[in-house]
Amino acid sequence: MDRWKQILITGGILALLALVPLTTTRTDLLTWFTFTLLYITLSQSWNIIGGYTGQQNLGHAAFFGLGALSSRYLWLSGIPLPIAFLLGALVAAFFALVIGFPAFRLRGIYFVIGTLVLAEILRIVVDTLLPRALVLPSKLLSTYSLVPRYYISLGIAFLTVAAVYAISRSRLGLGLMSIRENEDAAETLGVNTQIHKLVAFLISTFFAGLAGGIYAYYSSAVQPGYLFQPVWTFDAVIIVFVGGVGTILGPIIGSVFFVLLQRLLSLYLPGGMHLAVFGVLFIIVVLFLPGGLIELMSKLRNRILGGSRLN
Amino acid sequence: MILEVKDLSKTFGGLVAIRDLNFVVNKGQIVGLIGPNGSGKTTLFNLISGVLKPDKGFIKFNGMPITGLKPHGVCQKGIARTFQLTKPFANMTILQNVMVAKMYGSESIRNMKQAREECEKILEFIGLAGKSSATAATFGLVDRKRLEIARALATKPRLLLLDEVMSGLTAAEMEEAISLVKSIGDFGITLIIVEHVMKAILEISDKLIVLNYGEKIAEGTPQEVVHNKKVIEAYLGE
């Protein structure tokens, strides 16, 4: 696609999204949008390490939780919101730096299990140390509005997508993808695979921390342990795979689809049953449509346009 | 002298893969490395390229010790290799495959546009120019071998280790491969070639080194080596 067309479409979508709070005051709609943008940030951040670099990190919730918890404390202690967000994300990335060295000594399935276990340990520690729910002070509760929450999640989602886009078209992106495809070959061609995996992990967890910040700012009351629940990891993983793993548009389409389906299903199905639907959907996609929805869309488009290839 | 291997040894458990190996390779030479299956040829490549660490001895490249460097470090010093079982980046395009090597190898180019131009030249030379936007997953054996060589060349090596790039080729493809290897040599790149196809290796090599059970049993020009008694015994039995 031609560059100007791309910029125009992106700008148009952003402008439309910026207008949303001006055209509606329905809180359910604004919440949907805010969550979709939160999920775009979260899934896109997982996409960097899991999709592009091929390291299936199942401890993503730990970084979401660390970002959420730190930025919430900092924000409520009076630090300006943007700085609280930034510091929260840096805390998440710092934790990634600490566990990155030992974690990347593990390859394949051992890395997957290792990250899952680390995140669970952190969740249990947080649950034990901070058993009580964190509620916003009444002064903030009385002035609570969804509109700034919406704009912040829009801004951060845009930042995350832009960063992943830039990485995917850079030398770094090529290096990360080569690790996903064949780590031995990448190393032989001059890629310092250990350092590259660590860098991908830091970037990925930084944005996961920002996603956590969005949630911390959004929620009026939250149980600290909930921020570290594995569901944050698995939502992100499902979104990325259903949307299209290792692509820019995949996590975006996946997030829209995920939130829409989640809300619709929770209207008609008994509590929690929508998770089962997503589980089945995930299995179907992995087995029959490894490229995700994005592949399905381009296949359909090609068929409709009589086989003329667009991408 | 571009490569010096001195007293090199490597064992796996109780199995001796390389024993007290000594040899030198001069700049611009094409050296054929031959020997029966399991004689230690691929182990030697793994030792030079940093995939394995020797138990004893050292390897010097341009007078500098490289033992202990990781594979990416060895590559950045100017030694490239191909794998006997090709390892393409299957879900990336051919151009991207070669770009990785160009942007990370020795004398790497960090600018995307410049790197792309260089890579297109390499693909042209290797005969893959028309396929640069195909993914490597769609490639058959011959093209995968070509890609393997193209990537290795893109790292801008001074020394190139080719591991059985001609096995599985038809006679016509072999002729092409031989002239390709010769023209790589003409660029001034020093080559060490492991090959089972005797006709090819005798035609290309300036010097042959013969391994058996991890030891060097002969070294010399192709004519000298093929008449060497030890070599004939190693291949045909006594």
Image (tube, coloured by chain):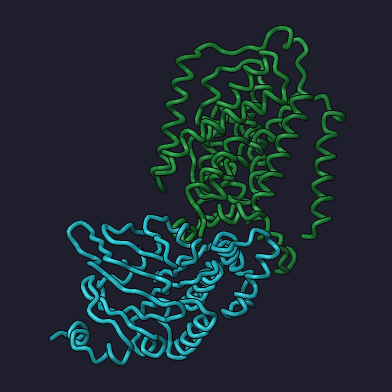
Pick the residue in front: B76 or B25: B25
How many labels sit on residues?
A: 0
Q: Relative to B163, does residue A259 appear above or below in the rendering?
A: above
Residue ID at (25%, 78%): B36
Residue at figure coordinates x 72%, y 31% from the top left: A153
Is residue A221 found left or right of A28 in the rendered image? left
Q: Position of residue B108 (x, y in %)?
A: 59, 62
Identified at 48% across, 62% down, the residue is B75
Res B121 quadrant in image = bottom right
Instruction: Tell me, yes or no, if residue A268 can be seen here.
Output: no
Residue under the image location 27 percent in, 88 percent down: B225
* Quarter that holds the C terminus of chain B: bottom left
Between residues A115 and A291, which one lies in front from this camera angle? A115
* x, y percent for residue B122: 60, 75
Image colour assigned to chain A: green
Where residue A206 sits, quadrant-wise, is: top right
In the rendered structure, the colour chosen for chain B is cyan
